[in-house]
């Protein structure tokens, strides 16, 4: 029995949609490969020394292929930095969700925020800051990562205050912002040649948190 015109076109359209989905998946996979290549190049050479030729060589493709999947090289760099910042936040969010005790969670977040060694990805995040003047589209990315980290700390402090673990001496948001600001400042120290050790920086931040929250915070309690 022959298909009716309606069933014929329905089948044809379904095939077209399936082909489109496959094509989009392939495109997304190639974009992800190029972003990974950009991260590797930037990790070795620095963000400002990363260029389309180096990324193409790293990904074993032509420069034309790179620009086929991204309208401009700046778009690829933006996607790379966006991915790095998002990954950083997700790691901290998972730490917060995995520790129910607010005091231990606060310590764990601070430990994660001031690592013993500055990773290539964290270095990339800070290297992208000088781009803000000429490429203001990066500003929402950095604002978002700051505000979401503040929110993680604020919610942790709020929970601790509600159950009597913390006794805040100032506005909760202000305390959270100060902790994030201290983390950012201390993470910059190694990048500018100040090497006092991450343990010292973490202890300094915890000292502020103890004072601001009128509580005991044990660094050894961190998982």
Image (cartoon, grey):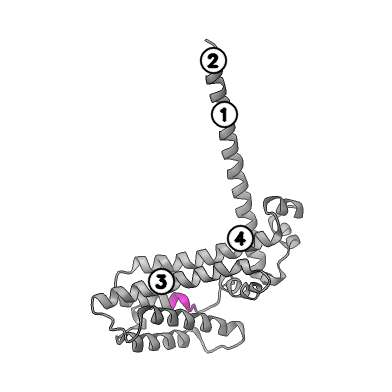
Determine the main secondary structure of the stretch shown in magenta. Answer: helix
What residue is shown with label 3?
A: 151
What residue is shown with label 1?
A: 13
**Which of the two discs, 3 and 2, labels the residue nearer the N terminus?**
2
Residue 101 image offset from top left, x and y in percent? 29, 73
**Residue name at image x 37 percent, y 69 percent:** 96
Disc 1/disc 3 C-alpha distance (Å): 46 Å
Disc 4/disc 2 C-alpha distance (Å): 46 Å
Disc 3 packing (10 Å; few <14; some 14–19; many ≥20): some
Q: What mark, if any, has residue 3 been given in the picture?
A: 2
| Residue 148, quarter of the rendered image | bottom left
**Which of the two discs, 3 and 4, labels the residue nearer the N terminus?**
4
Disc 2 packing (10 Å; few <14; some 14–19; many ≥20): few
| Residue 39, quarter of the rendered image | bottom right
**Residue name at image x 56 percent, y 20 percent:** 8
SS for dot 4: helix
What residue is shown with label 4?
A: 79
Foreground pick, 221 / 172: 172
Disc 2/disc 1 C-alpha distance (Å): 14 Å
Confirm whether residue 204 shows in the render: yes
**Which of the two discs, 2 and 1, labels the residue nearer the N terminus?**
2
Residue 98 image offset from top left, x and y in percent? 35, 66
């Amino acid at each position: 029995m022959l298909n009716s015109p309606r069933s014929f076109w329905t089948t044809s359209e379904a095939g077209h949609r399936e082909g489109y989905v496959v094509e989009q998946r392939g495109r997304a996979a190639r974009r992800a490969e190029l972003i990974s290549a950009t991260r590797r190049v930037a990790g070795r050479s620095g963000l400002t020394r990363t260029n389309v030729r180096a990324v193409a060589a790293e990904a074993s493709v032509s420069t034309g292929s790179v620009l086929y999947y991204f309208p401009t090289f700046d778009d690829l760099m933006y996607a790379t930095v966006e991915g790095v910042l998002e990954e950083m936040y997700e790691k901290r969010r998972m730490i917060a969700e995995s520790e129910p005790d607010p005091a231990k969670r606060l310590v764990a977040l601070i430990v994660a925020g001031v690592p013993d060694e500055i990773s290539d990805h964290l270095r990339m995040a800070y290297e992208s800051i000088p781009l803000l003047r000429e490429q203001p589209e990066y500003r929402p990315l950095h604002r978002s990562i700051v505000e979401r980290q503040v929110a993680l700390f604020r919610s942790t402090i709020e929970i601790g205050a509600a159950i009597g673990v913390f006794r805040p001496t100032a506005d909760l948001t202000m305390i959270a912002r100060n902790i994030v600001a201290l983390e950012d400042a201390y993470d910059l120290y190694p990048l500018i040649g100040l090497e006092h050790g991450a343990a010292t920086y973490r202890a300094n931040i915890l000292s502020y948190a103890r004072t601001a929250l009128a509580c005991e915070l044990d660094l050894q309690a961190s998982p």
